[in-house]
Image (cartoon, rainbow, N blue to C red):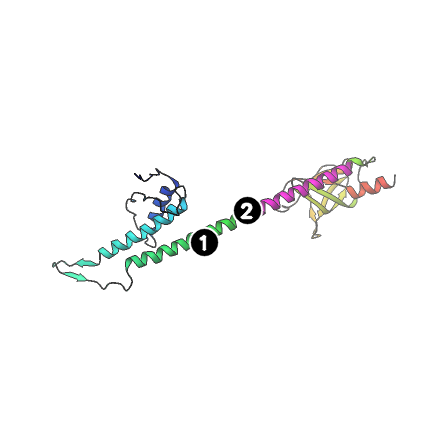
């Protein structure tokens, strides 16, 4: 004896309920959906744990029931008891529901494709961020190893302009030029060679200092660690 299985509040059932309301009220603003029918038995080719299969089934049934309701209301009775017959549409409600159902299926397929593309974009963003982080850590290690390999460090930096390496969390800039006055950074230039003031800078100690940028760099205003790598390299080569 064959007994149909009942999937209580399964993904299929939840999808059917959501789809039925969507199909019944499709393109009907202000529509109040009726009580959702009992979830039908899963068809061959459908999955009982598939929200999408239940949703598609619900949309079809909702569209059909709404169309059948419209068909039953084709007669409108006047106050005198006479009936007014409206022209029947050239296309039957069942055919309309089938067309709407097919449209909804195409929409669902499109949404699925867009979701897959969105996931692919997010994956590529995450991959790019990971590669950027790895590149940052590599440059940090390289700069740190080179800095601590020097045997001579200046007591102070003479006034003038210097090429430096600027670093902060997950960002390294090796195209910085800073202007030093009285052993402090007073302004700086980046790749655009626009002079900007440094609102605050620590004293330069052993060829490095911290500096606050005048304006956000890549949307961030974090303090920068400044390394006078070129000056230190020249100093140690000429020792």
Residue 212 visible? The answer is no
- Image position, residue 202 (x, y; %): 72, 37
Q: Nearer the viewer, residue 72 or 191?
A: 72
In reply to whether residue 142 is colored magenta, the answer given is: yes
At mark 1, the secondary structure is helix
Seen in the picture, residue 227 relative to 56 is either above or below; the reply is above
Q: Nearer the viewer, mark 2 or mark 1?
A: 1
Q: Quadrant of the N terminus?
A: top left
User: Over which residues does the magenta segment extend?
Assistant: 121-147
- In which image quadrant can residue 229 be found? top right
- Image position, residue 106 (x, y; %): 42, 55
- In which image quadrant can residue 200 be found? top right
Within-10-Å neighbours for mark 1: few <14, some 14–19, many 20+: few
Q: Is residue 62 left or right of residue 164?
A: left
Q: Nearer the viewer, residue 8 or 228?
A: 8
Point out the residue furthest to the left here. Answer: 80
- Image position, residue 104 (x, y; %): 38, 54
In space, the residues marked 2 and 1 are separated at their CA atoms by 18 Å
Q: Is residue 8 left or right of residue 152?
A: left
Within-10-Å neighbours for mark 2: few <14, some 14–19, many 20+: few
Q: Nearer the viewer, residue 8 or 115?
A: 8
What residue is disc 2 on?
Answer: 122
Residue appearing at x 32%, y 50% in the figure: 61
What residue is disc 1 on?
Answer: 110
């Amino acid at each position: 004896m064959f007994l149909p299985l009942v999937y209580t509040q399964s993904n299929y059932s939840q999808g059917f309920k959501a789809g039925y309301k969507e199909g019944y009220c499709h393109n009907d603003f202000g529509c109040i959906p009726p009580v959702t029918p009992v979830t039908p038995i899963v068809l061959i080719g459908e999955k009982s744990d598939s929200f999408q299969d239940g949703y598609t089934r619900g949309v079809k049934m909702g569209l059909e029931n709404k169309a059948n309701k419209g068909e039953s209301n084709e007669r409108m009775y006047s106050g005198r008891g006479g009936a007014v017959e409206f022209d029947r549409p050239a296309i039957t409600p069942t055919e309309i529901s089938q067309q709407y159902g097919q449209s909804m299926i195409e929409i669902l397929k499109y949404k699925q494709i867009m979701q897959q593309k969105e996931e692919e974009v997010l994956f590529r963003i995450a991959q790019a961020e990971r590669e950027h982080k790895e590149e940052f850590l590599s440059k940090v290690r390289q700069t740190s190893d080179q800095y601590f390999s020097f045997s001579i460090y200046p007591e102070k930096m003479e006034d003038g302009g210097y090429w430096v390496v600027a670093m902060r969390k997950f960002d390294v800039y090796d195209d910085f030029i800073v202007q030093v006055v009285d052993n402090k950074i007073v302004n700086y230039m980046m790749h655009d060679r626009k002079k900007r003031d440094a609102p605050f800078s620590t004293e330069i100690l052993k060829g490095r200092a911290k500096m606050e940028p005048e304006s956000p760099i890549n949307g961030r205003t974090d303090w920068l660690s400044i390394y006078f790598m070129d000056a230190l390299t020249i100093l140690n080569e000429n020792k």
